[in-house]
Image (spheres, rainbow, N blue to C red):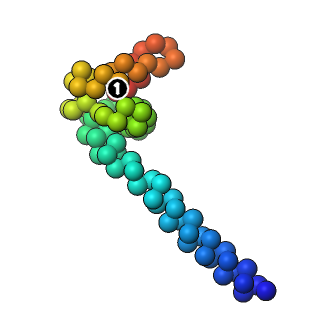
Amino acid sequence: MKLILVTFLLVSLVLSSSFFEVSMAGSGFCDSKCKVRCSKAGVKDRCLKYCGICCKKCNCVPSGTYGNKQECPCYRDMKNSKGKPKCP
């Protein structure tokens, strides 16, 4: 009985880990674009967080490390709760 339970748990673990890899694999585009965009940021972890949020919603990130927001109007026009630009 214990052997069946252990086998079931191992199979479940393997299947669930492969599911998580597939679900997280789609962020490669945003990760690479945001890494470039935030390369010169003072607070990189915050820059990467908000850039990632904006990229996933808009499917684009402006080129360069600053400015060029006209390349991506959705990214440019996103505002935080205080009405200031959300995307770095």
Location of residue 85 by image quarter: top left
Q: Which residue is drawn at 25% across and 30% down?
A: 62
Q: Mark 1 points at which residue?
A: 75
Image coords of residue 17 (percent x, y): 53, 65
Q: Count numbered badges in the picture.
A: 1
Left or right of residue 79: residue 69: left
Residue 32 visible to the viewer: yes
Residue 7, compared with residue 53, is above or below; it is below
Location of residue 55 by image quarter: top left
Left or right of residue 24: residue 10: right
The N terminus sits in image quarter: bottom right
Q: Residue at x 40, y 37 (%)?
A: 56
In the orientation shown, which residue stands out farthest toward the right? 1
Residue 43, compared with residue 79, is above or below; it is below
Q: Which residue is drawn at 62% across and 71% down?
A: 12
Image coords of residue 52 (percent x, y): 40, 37
Left or right of residue 32: residue 9: right
Image coords of residue 44 (percent x, y): 36, 37
In the orientation shown, which residue stands out farthest toward the top? 83
The C terminus sits in image quarter: top left
Give the secondary structure at mark 1: helix
Q: Which residue is drawn at 42% across and 15% down?
A: 84
Label 1, residues with CA under 10 Å away: few <14, some 14-19, many ≥20: many
Residue 56, compared with residue 68, is above or below; it is below
Residue 43 visible to the viewer: no
- Amino acid carrying label 1: it is Tyr
Location of residue 11 by image quarter: bottom right
Image coords of residue 72 (percent x, y): 28, 26
